[in-house]
Each structure stands twice: as structure tokens, then as C-alpha cells.
Amino acid sequence: MEQEFVSYEVAVALKELGFDEEVLEYYYTDTRELCDIMKEIKAPLKQQVLRWFREKYGLYATIIFRTSMEDNNEYWDWLIKGEEVVYRHFKTYEEAENACIDKLIELAKQQSNTDDTLLKQQDNGKL
């Protein structure tokens, strides 16, 4: 079941973005192992993270299975609403899911940075 949870590094990035949902597991910060004892690093399920990005940032993502027309091989890919479609050809669903969550974190950080810049400009009377 451990593969259902985001990695420690992703959990830290989510905390920085303000993730504060109820979770089943936490990470020990010293060993980076999962535990059910309440700690400061929450370990959400990947499914929970995808929902959180939809609700908090309006970032809609899906993992798709497809067959390449070029070489007739089967792949997993991810799509995020509003992002340019680039097929990455992951061998497993889990690889595509992890890469998708990484991209969502990147997009959310960009969105947060833009929001912070706008707030600073408003505070300085530039808007």
C-alpha cells in the first residue's frame, strides 16, 4: 500500500504549497518512513493530491493509456487541462502519475509566485 502515498519529497513540497488535509499516514522527518503517528509531514494518498490540486488551484489532471501511432507501442501519459499536450511515454501508470504530480507542483508554485507578485504590487500601490 505504500505506493499509494506520495514520496517524502513530494509531501514536503505539498506542505510548502499549503496542503493541510486530513491524512492516514505521516512521515518521520529523520528516517522519511511512513507512520500512523501524527507528525509534521503529512503523507497524502496520490488520489487525494490530485483532488486537492483540482479544488485549490483549478488544475485538472488525468492519466491516460494510449497506443503510439508511430511505433505501435503502448504507453501511459498524463494530461493537465490547459497545458500543451506532450506525450511522454511512461511504461507504467505509477510513473505517469508521479510525473503528473511533479508537474502539478511546478504549476502550483508558478501560480503562487504570480499571486504573490500581484499582492506585493497591490501593497505598493502599483496596481
Image (cartoon, rainbow, N blue to C red):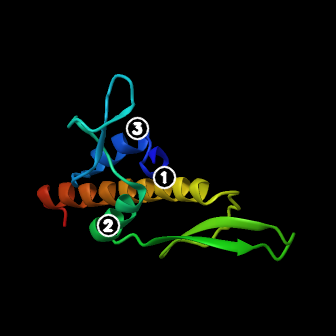
Numbered tag placed on residue 111 in the rendering = none
* Residue shown at the point (47%, 56%) measured from the top left: 101
| Residue annotated with mark 1 | 102
Give x and y (percent) for residue 111: 35, 61
| Separation of residues labelled 2 and 1 (CA atoms) | 14 Å
Residue, x 19% and y 59% (percent of image)? 119
Q: Is residue 12 above or below residue 83?
A: above
> Label 2: which residue?
57
Q: CA distance from mark 2 to mark 3?
A: 22 Å
Comes first in the chain, label 3 or label 1: 3
Disc 3 marks a residue whose amino acid type is Tyr
User: For the residue labelled by badge 3, is the local secondary structure a helix, a strand or a loop?
Assistant: helix
- Left or right of 55? Residue 100 is right
From the viewer's side, name the closer residue of 22 and 90. 22
Q: Quadrant of the C terminus?
A: bottom left
> Can you tell which quarter of the image residue 74 is in?
bottom right
Q: Toward the viewer: 23 or 20? A: 23
Q: What is the C-alpha distance between the residues marked 3 and 1?
A: 12 Å
| Label 2–label 3 contact, CB within 8 A | no
Q: Position of residue 82 (x, y in %)?
A: 48, 76
Give the SS element for disc 1.
helix
- Inspect the image, locate mark 2, and give the three-letter code of the amino acid beneath it: Tyr
Q: Position of residue 114 (x, y in %)?
A: 32, 59
Q: Which residue is mark 3?
A: 8
Quarter occupied by residue 54? bottom left
Contact (CB < 8 A) between labels 3 and 1?
no
Q: Does 36 sit left or right of 104 as displayed? A: left
In the image, which is nearer the foreground, mark 2 or mark 3? 3
Q: Amino acid at mark 1?
A: Asp
Q: Residues within 10 Å of mark 2 (few under 14, many from 20)?
A: some
Give the residue at the far right of this rendering. 71
